[in-house]
Image (cartoon, helix red, strand yellow):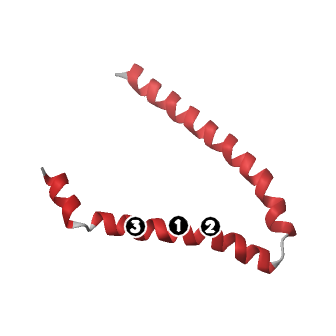
């Protein structure tokens, strides 16, 4: 039982380390972009990010409330 727990802890630690490595690279890339941009530039960047996210959320809501999909998943 303790062996399985130590494996889970090791996997979690590897995941956390990988997350910080990837996040550090993002901070290095995007900090100058936001720091040197104008307000208009920032609005364009945020719009390009949030509009597709909103579209994806809307499509996901449509798909989860579709009756034809619901009947197939209940089988």
User: Which residue is most to the right?
Assistant: 36
User: Which residue is most to the left?
Assistant: 75
At which x and y percent is residue 72?
17, 54
Judged from the image, the secondary structure of the residue bearing numbered disc 1 is: helix
Q: Circle 2 sits on which residue?
A: 49
Q: Which of the numbered marks, if any, corresponds to residue 17?
A: none
- Whichever of callouts 3 and 1 sits on the residue coming sooner in the sequence is 1
Tally of marks: 3
**In contact (CB < 8 Å): disc 3 and disc 2:** no
Q: Is residue 70 left or right of residue 19?
A: left
Q: Which of the numbered marks, if any, corresponds to residue 59?
A: 3
Q: Circle 1 sits on which residue?
A: 53
At which x and y percent is residue 74?
14, 54
At which x and y percent is residue 70?
19, 60
**In contact (CB < 8 Å): disc 1 and disc 2:** yes
The structure residue drawn at horizontal position 34% and vertical position 22%, both measured from the top left corner, is 1
Q: Is residue 71 left or right of residue 16?
A: left
Q: CA distance from mark 1 to mark 2?
A: 7 Å
Q: Nearer the viewer, mark 3 or mark 2?
A: 3
Q: Is residue 43 above or below residue 60?
A: below
The structure residue drawn at horizontal position 15% and vertical position 58%, both measured from the top left corner, is 71
Q: Of 75 and 20, which appears nearest the observer?
A: 75
The structure residue drawn at horizontal position 71% and vertical position 77%, both measured from the top left corner, is 43
Locate residue 19: give its quadrant. Answer: top right
Q: Is residue 46 above or below residue 30?
A: below
Q: Nearer the viewer, mark 3 or mark 1?
A: 3
Q: Of 21 and 13, which appears nearest the observer?
A: 21
Q: Of 59 and 33, which appears nearest the observer?
A: 59
């Amino acid at each position: 039982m303790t062996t399985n727990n130590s494996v889970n802890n090791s996997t979690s630690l590897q995941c956390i380390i990988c997350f910080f490595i990837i996040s550090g690279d993002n901070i290095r890339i995007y900090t100058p972009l936001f720091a040197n941009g104008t307000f208009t530039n920032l609005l364009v960047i945020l719009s390009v990010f949030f509009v597709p996210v909103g579209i994806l959320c809307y499509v996901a809501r449509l798909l989860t409330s579709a009756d034809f999909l619901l009947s197939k998943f209940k089988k």
